[in-house]
Image: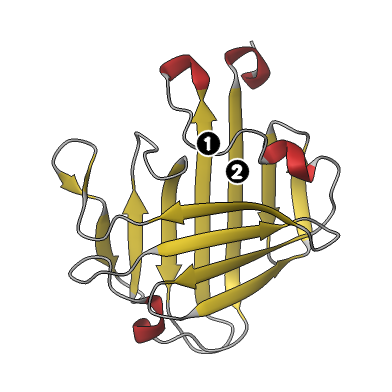
Amino acid sequence: MNERSFGKEKLKLVVDKIVPPVSQGQLGDPVQGTTAYAICLYDESDTLAATLRVNRPGAVCNGTTPCWKSVSGPGLKYNDKFLVANGVQQILLKSGDAGHGKVVVKGKNDIGNGRTNMPVGVAAMFLGDRRATAQVLTSNASCFSIALPTVKNADGQLFKAVSP
């Protein structure tokens, strides 16, 4: 059976090379601090299609595991298999010199398993789009705007976009 028959909707954004330099301080600190995030998604006509909010600094996910952890790079990783914060399953943020920062955001709805926190229709908002834009906003006033010129899938159930 295909994913549509299970009522799933998925979103995946991958940006491997953030053009401006990104410092570790710009990423904030959701591990020991209070940083929250909003991921704003714009369709190819630059209309805001969705905002996904992850306000879980210091929270526990998946039973007893911290939602956030520091990773090498240096960077931060969020992981929540229960999709509590607007259906966001994973965020990976890495700092670096120009062209070396990284952002990955994965989210989904899984109606069959009762996980419906991602706003319904996010993937459908990008149906047929060939490009998109994402912004990552932190509660400590940092903003990363990222062009996603390569849309790999926009079929209404899955939206997958990557940077070059």
The answer to whether residue 164 is seen in the rendering is no
Of residues 114 and 81, the one nearer the viewer is: 114
Q: Position of residue 28 (x, y in %)?
A: 34, 76
Mark number displayed over residue 11: 2
The secondary element bearing badge 2 is classed as strand
Q: Quadrant of residue 10?
A: top right
Q: Quadrant of residue 113?
A: top left
Distance from disc 1 to disc 2, alpha carbons, whole Å, reads: 6 Å
Mark number displayed over residue 117: none
The secondary element bearing badge 1 is classed as strand
Quadrant of the rendering where the N terminus is positioned: top right
Mark number displayed over residue 108: 1
Q: In the image, 18: left or right of 155? A: left
Q: Position of residue 119 (x, y in %)?
A: 57, 38
Of residues 90 and 118, the one nearer the viewer is: 118
Q: Disc 2 residue type? A: Leu
The answer to whether residue 161 is seen in the rendering is yes
Task: Name which of mark 1 and mark 2 comes first in the sequence.
Answer: 2
Q: In the image, 63: left or right of 103? A: left
Quadrant of the rendering where the C terminus is positioned: bottom right
Marks 1,2: beta carbons within 8 A: yes
The answer to whether residue 85 is above or below residue 147 is: above
Of residues 97 and 130, the one nearer the viewer is: 130
Q: Position of residue 159 (x, y in %)?
A: 69, 43
The answer to whether residue 52 is above or below residue 82 is: below
The answer to whether residue 146 is above or below residue 107 is: below
The structure residue drawn at horizontal position 60% and vertical position 60%, both measured from the top left corner, is: 40
The structure residue drawn at horizontal position 53% and vertical position 36%, both measured from the top left corner, is: 108
